[in-house]
Image (cartoon, rainbow, N blue to C red):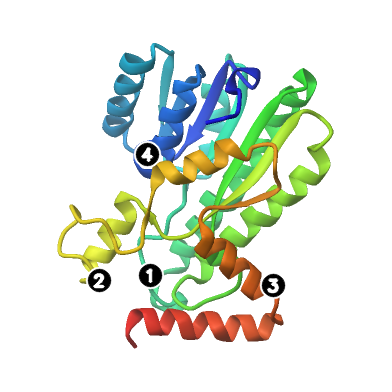
Amino acid sequence: MTTDLGRYGPWALIVGASDGVGAAFAEAVASGGLNVVLVARRQALLDEVAAGIAAQHGVQTRTVAVDLVEPGAADALIEATADLAIGFLVYCAGADPDFKPFLAKSISAAEAMVQRNCMVPMRLCHTLVPPMVERGAGAVVIVGSGAGFVGGPNMVAYGASKAFGMVFAEALWSELRHTGVDVIGLILGKTDTPALRRLECERGQIASTAEVPDGAAPAEQAVAVALDNLTGGPTVYVGEQVAGMAQLLASQGRNESVAFMAQAITAAMGK
């Protein structure tokens, strides 16, 4: 890690911190000396992560258990951190556990995805970033996915919400780039997380959740790339595969890219 995190401090808010990339982010920023607020739905997992971080790094921790799909989720987070100087915001939530066609899922599932991936991070930024601008220092990381590059089957609402996050980060960067607030959209490819392991196990692609999915990059790699490129926004790709995919799709028309994505996903599913 080459970035001096101390200048962003003293507190980091990590949304989606109970496992996977979010937990790795919390560990990394704590190792850089920042106190951390850990946010996720499951209190027991949050407490476990917080205890480990406090013991290893000697920083302060706070946990906030909240279901991000609830209408008042953003307000609850803002209220729970109102007494803290948040200088680093990481939004790493909103994985899609159901790789199924749009019409095979309830509309409430799609609406929940939009709430979690679009409405909550937008509201958090609108409230937490102004004090960063006033201090002349801060950082925002919106964790995205290659699924947001172009529309594809079985991830309609998920891909659309990740496209929102990517463009939101780019636009926010363009407005804040001379204020001392660093903004990046961190675009992940296939990443080894508990959510991915569960999904691939259910689909029979791995025998158990103890296995690492084929081709999945460690969560720590994504975090390292983010922290090494905080000042290099607005969009940061994790791994050569994602960067190559972005370049390929950008070289084609939108219609060709959509057709390519559909074919690639169908081939990957063996259908």
Q: Is residue 19 above or below residue 214?
A: above
Name which quarter of the figure residue 97 lies in: bottom left
Around disc 1, counting alpha carbons within 10 Å, would you say few (fewer than 14), some (14 to 19), or many (20 or more)?
A: some
**Residue at 58 percent of width and 37 percent of height:** 228
Name which quarter of the figure residue 244 lies in: bottom right
Q: Give, as a three-letter code, the residue at label 4.
A: Arg
Q: Give, as a three-letter code, the residue at label 2.
A: Arg
85 with respect to 27 (left or right):
right
Kindly indicate whether the residue at mark 1 contacts the one at mark 2 (C-beta within 8 angstroms). Answer: yes
Q: Which mark is residue 253?
A: none
Q: Give, as a three-letter code, the residue at label 3.
A: Ala
Q: Which residue is mark 2?
A: 203
Foreground residue among 163 and 101:
163
Q: Which residue is mark 3?
A: 250
Q: Is residue 132 above or below residue 227?
A: above
Query: Which label sits in the foreground, 3 or 1?
Result: 3
